[in-house]
Image (spheres, rainbow, N blue to C red):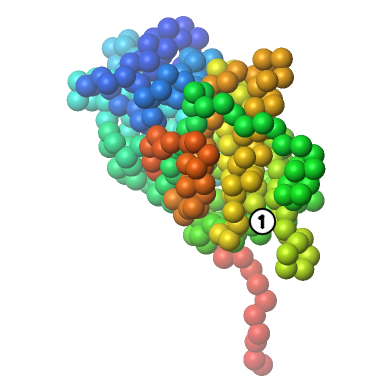
């Protein structure tokens, strides 16, 4: 291949919009990350309108150009607080060359990220179109899978809970002081290898309710279109009160679905928490029509069952299962520690 990878320019906008649109269709020569596109507001192109529609100054967009024709694009979000980069969109179009185009884009991203101090690269993709193989060839490692569930607008949202109901269920808004209990909750419900790879710090948990993306999900990029709220469910059955579950709500400001994420201990029934969250979304949507009702998306990792079954009981249906992959750009070393010595 004789083409080259470069940063996108404003003059590329029209071509990139068309390339992104084609990549989300059933096109024989197109490849993308393969998120579910069976519903009009869930495809990657629909979620982000145009590739540059919600672009931030610290985000990056690379294109593959061959003979003055753009045949590939790679869009990246950068989290400055954690030095992590997330691949949001990776498209390639061409007769038999789309796989090579995308691989060259990923390789260029990894080299550029190493120069800019990136610590981790994240991506979520479907298992089709050679996606996992492409990233694993580039040094990414699988570390989880998520089921994407969707609750459509044909079902009315439940009524918002009263203050008495909320207090009786032990539900309250998150506070910065919940950082340590939330970190312990996460470590309890998450496999140790995943905890080590994601490497959250207490400062990450302290930002709950302020556009926090912890814990990470495959749908994290859509959270920039939402106002985030976080709630915890407490229990005092066995001695001191402790955090039993975490609820994150993303109330969409644009034409995207709302976001609902639940993390809970295995013995916790999350049905009340889900009902509370849906009722709160109903109240937000009904407040003067300021929030559009485009349904609700909920990601659930495969090891978090039976949360997915409780969501299905609340009217959610499964869309697809996506794979989570990550590449670390730094080498982990053992932390220094004191050890006993014999003289």
The residue under the point 56% across, 26% down is 156
Q: Position of residue 223 (x, y in %)?
A: 59, 30
- Disc 1 secondary structure class: strand
Question: Looking at the image, which is closer to me, 100 or 276?
Answer: 276
Q: Quadrant of residue 94?
A: top left
Screen quadrant of the N terminus: top left
Q: Position of residue 151 (x, y in %)?
A: 50, 31
Q: Position of residue 266 (x, y in %)?
A: 56, 59
The residue under the point 50% across, 42% down is 313
Q: Position of residue 141 (x, y in %)?
A: 40, 49
Q: Name, please, the residue furthest toward the left.
A: 96
Question: Looking at the image, which is closer to me, 45 or 99?
Answer: 45
Q: Quadrant of residue 6?
A: top left
Q: Is residue 30 left or right of residue 146?
A: left
Q: Name, please, the residue furthest toward the bottom.
A: 343
**Residue identified by numbered label 1:** 244
Residue 70 seen in the current view = yes
Total number of numbered labels? 1
The residue under the point 32% across, 33% down is 103
The residue under the point 37% across, 11% down is 18
- Compared to residue 273, the image places residue 11 above or below, namely above
Q: Is residue 105 left or right of residue 236?
A: left
Screen quadrant of the C terminus: bottom right
Residue 248 seen in the current view = no
Question: Looking at the image, which is closer to me, 76 or 271?
Answer: 271
Neighbourhood count class around disc 1 (C-alpha, 10 Å): few under 14, some 14–19, many 20 upward: many
């Amino acid at each position: 291949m004789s083409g080259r990878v470069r940063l996108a320019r404003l003059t590329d906008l029209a071509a990139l919009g068309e390339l992104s649109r084609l990549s989300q269709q059933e096109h024989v020569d197109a490849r993308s990350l393969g998120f579910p596109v069976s519903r009009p507001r869930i495809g990657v192109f629909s979620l982000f309108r145009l590739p540059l529609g919600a672009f931030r100054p610290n985000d990056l967009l690379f294109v593959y150009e061959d003979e003055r024709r753009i045949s590939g694009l790679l869009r990246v979000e950068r989290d400055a607080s954690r030095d992590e980069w997330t691949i949001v969109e990776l498209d390639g179009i061409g007769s038999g060359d789309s796989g090579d185009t995308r691989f060259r884009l990923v390789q260029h991203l990894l080299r550029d990220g190493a120069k800019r101090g990136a610590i981790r690269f994240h991506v979520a993709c479907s298992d089709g179109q050679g996606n996992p193989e492409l990233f694993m060839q580039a040094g990414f490692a699988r570390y989880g899978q998520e089921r994407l569930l969707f609750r459509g607008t044909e079902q009315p949202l439940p009524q918002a809970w009263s203050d008495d109901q909320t207090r009786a269920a032990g539900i309250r808004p998150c506070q910065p002081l919940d950082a340590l209990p939330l970190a312990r909750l996460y470590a309890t419900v998450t496999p140790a290898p995943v905890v080590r790879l994601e490497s959250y710090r207490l400062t990450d948990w302290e930002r709950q309710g302020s556009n926090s993306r912890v814990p990470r999900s495959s749908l994290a990029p859509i959270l920039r279109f939402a106002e985030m709220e976080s709630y915890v469910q407490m229990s005092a059955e066995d001695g001191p009160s402790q955090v039993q579950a975490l609820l994150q709500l993303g109330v969409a400001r644009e034409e995207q679905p709302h976001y609902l994420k639940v993390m809970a201990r295995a013995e916790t029934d999350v049905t009340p928490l889900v009902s509370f969250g849906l009722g709160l979304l109903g109240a937000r949507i009904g407040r003067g029509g300021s929030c559009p009702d485009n349904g609700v998306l909920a990601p659930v990792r495969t090891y978090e069952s039976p949360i997915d079954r409780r969501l299905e009981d609340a009217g959610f249906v499964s869309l697809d299962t996506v794979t989570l992959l990550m590449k670390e750009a730094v080498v982990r070393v053992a932390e220094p520690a004191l050890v006993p010595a014999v003289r």
